[in-house]
Amino acid sequence: DYVKEREYLVEAMLPLVQKCKDLNRCMRIGTNHGSLSSRVLSYYGDTPRGMVESAIEFADICRSQDYHNFVFSMKASNPLVMVQSYRLLASEMYRLGWDYPLHLGVTEAGEGEDGRMKSAVGIGTLLADGLGDTVRVSLTEDPEFEYEPCNRLAEMAESRLAATNPEADARQKAVRKYVDTRDITTYARRVGALPEKKEEEKVDVGLFLNPNGSVISSISSPMLSEGNAPYLYKELGFKTAVGMPFKDIATSDSVFMRTLPAADDSKSRTSLRRMMEVGTGVIVPAEELEKNPLENAVALMSLTEAVAKNGKLPDGAIRLAVEIDGSEDDETIAKVKDLDPMMITVCIDENLSQLHASRRIFEILKANDVMTPAIHHYKTTSSESNELALELGTKIGSLLTDGNGDGILIEQVGETNFSVDFLRNTGFSLLQGCRMRNTKTEFVSCPSCGRTLFDLQETTAQIQEATGHLPGVTVAVMGCIVNGPGEMADADFGYVGTLPGKVDLYYGKEVVRKSIPNAEAVDALVELIKSYGMWKDKEEAEEVEEAAVAA
């Protein structure tokens, strides 16, 4: 049956191929994650491998007619699926001796920093692999706003290309030799082993990190003053009851401080202690703790220093964290296992290629069976939010899509002015974009075009306002039936324009309500989510938190 159905496909496609060949027109072979044929699904499933086999099948038909004027595109809204699909396709082309162009894009990425982040994770990762000939950042914004992120991603890739950039060449050559053992045919995340609380410890170190990916926020001493502390708690994502902080779903797991409040600053120290009592780690450089001790702090040392001191902690410190910058030799990095720190921070020396030095570190950790959680410490000088999203998606996302990394610490350097709240949310957006930790509703929304049957940006904003508080739920907003079921493969619920003024609602790939007037459709979507037991009122969520506090 599989072969017979392929015969029908050949018969249907040959006239198009011949027409394109006669007119010297280019064709894009775009395989869509959400609309693989039933015959491909039955054999390969809804997988990157199925996408690649489908694309190769169409390409074979083109090649049978000596038609080679085509480009490949692997369309998926999930950056991990997108990256794996292109890598598999490139591998298959190497095997077959083919060399056709690749058009890169995370389809229906959404809007704002989230849309740029997801696009950078997918596109930036592949450009760093040397894959990709053209790019498109698909945003639910006016089309002219798509150009800048496209251009910046291309510029970032160019700046890392050793063949044309002497500085990039020097950074790559400065990385010690290593063997890359990544398996590009599958995705498997290295999950660090969380620290366990010891009987004598007064705080629960097991809460300092999260198994699905951690966000560590950089804060300064003035933020802890009596007048500022309530605002800091909010910026860090805490819920509060009678002024006391309690962790919520998107609270920073730990905080990083280069300097501590003075020992006699009891108010600021109390603010720190309250966070620690509810499972927030306080990570401080060891040299600062030696001058200004803090009970139950995590002491951060360079790996070289930690080895020299045999992991000896400053007074008051409860656990060790080690920083690896990539300049260390293999034997030194392997000694992490003997030191048994609660975490590693990967903060690459600026004279090394950040991507290659990081991959080398993870290869050494794997070879020595070191399962200590590894947090990417990213220092940014950017003062523009969209630029930061592209940087993180490209430089850290390319490592997380390899399965390497247990979280992110973003530290501002120089004249930057991002709030703690913004950087915390950016960190969580990165983890969610890399399919690690869900802390909010995931939205898949198409870019507007001439087929769109409602105001896409306004409607998307309304849906985000109504449903944006449901972590673990994915909602697709599609302007027309063309971009409907086929491009929302990962969505739980779909909102699709079908006729002027009318919307269809989907559960998965099944239409469950048809021709709903636009004015009623958002409310109908909320009711649909409720009917499948995936709804929680915003007020209800707060009441649950207050009840937990009271208990």
Image (tube, grey):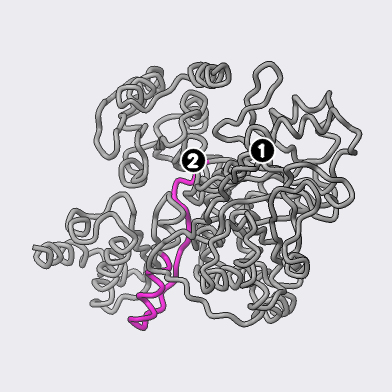
**Which amino acid lies under the numbered mark 1 shown in the image of this protein?**
Lys
Residue 335 included in the magenta stretch of the image: no
Place residue 500 in its image quadrant.
top left
Which type of secondary structure does the marked residue at label 2 adopt? loop
Q: Is residue 81 left or right of residue 288?
A: left
Q: Which residues are magenta?
A: 86-110
Q: Which residue is mark 2?
A: 438
In x, y percent, where is residue 418? 75, 41
State the residue in front, 532 or 65. Answer: 532
Query: Residue at coordinates 57% horizontally, 50% vertically from top-left?
Result: 195
Residue 432 shows up from this direction: yes
Q: Is residue 257 above or below residue 301?
A: above
State the residue in front, 22 or 339. Answer: 339
In x, y percent, where is residue 239? 62, 25
Label 1: few (<14), some or many (≥20) within 10 Å? few
Q: Which residue is mark 1?
A: 202
Which type of secondary structure does the marked residue at label 1 adopt? loop
Q: Could you tell me how far apart the alpha carbons at marks 2 and 1 are, in whole angstroms?
A: 30 Å
Of all residues, the one furthest to the front in this rendering is: 200
**Which amino acid lies under the numbered mark 2 shown in the image of this protein?**
Asn
